[in-house]
Image (cartoon, rainbow, N blue to C red):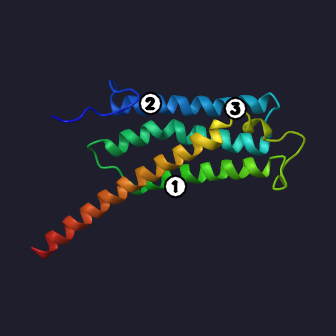
Amino acid sequence: MQPASVHPLPWAKPNDRLKALTVTILSLWFLVLILHYQDLLPSVFALPAGWGDIAIGATAPLMASAISSKTSFPKKIFVAWNLLGMLDLVMAVTLGILASASPLGVLAGEITTQVMGTFPLSLIPTFFVPLLFIFHLIALGRVWNEAEGEGVMQSEIKEV
């Protein structure tokens, strides 16, 4: 008997959990764009960070279903997509710092990223961004492990 898996939604299929996560992430970044249009976040931060995250988040279910389907899917595309997602997260944090009211805020104008330091918005840079970065690393690690496994099998076949 296998132990029950521990998930926030144990009754949901993995693909359903991914869809729920995608909706959550997209909602957070729509919030960032809304805050920009209410003049609470600067354009230099909100537009590239918001639209970049929406693009990666909206394509996450497509990538997940493509990589997990039984048809062949170029792993290079999946790796590139994950690297773009990680780059987007790094860019968002970097622009957030550069548009802040700190000594590093060389892009700061009249409107800064100060609102991102207040709860609950502070959860985005302090919790969700690292969590998503880790998800990308896990996905890349899985592809790497699969590729290594295929490499081992190929070398065993050549030896025979």
Q: Is 117 in front, or is 35?
A: 117
Question: Image quadrant of residue 159?
Answer: bottom left
Report crowding for label 3: few under 14, some 14 to 19, many 20 or more residues within 10 A (C-alpha).
few
Amino acid identity at mark 2: Lys
Element at badge 3? loop
Note whether 41 is above or below 134 in the view shown: above
Q: Residue 26 placed where, x, y %? A: 57, 32
Sequence-wise, which precedes: disc 3 or disc 2? 2
Q: Are marks 3 and 2 in contact (CB under 8 Å)?
A: no
- Image position of 130 (left or right of 150): right
In this rendering, the answer to whether 78 lies above or below 11 is below
Disc number for residue 17: none
Left or right: where 118 falls relative to 75: right
Picture layout, residue 4 above or below residue 49: above
The residue where tag 2 is placed is 19
Depth check: 108 or 55 in front? 108
Which quadrant, please, contains the C terminus? Answer: bottom left
The answer to which of marks 3 and 1 sits earlier in the sequence is 1
Tag 2, which secondary structure? helix
Residue tagged 1: 83
148 vs 129, left or right, is left
Residue located 34% across and 49% down the image: 73
* Residue reaching furthest to the top: 11
Q: Could you say where residue 112 lies in the image, as x and y percent from the top left?
A: 83, 41
Side of 124 where 79 appears, left or right = left
Q: Amino acid at mark 3?
A: Phe
In the image, what residue type sits under mark 1? Leu
At which x and y percent is residue 111? 86, 39
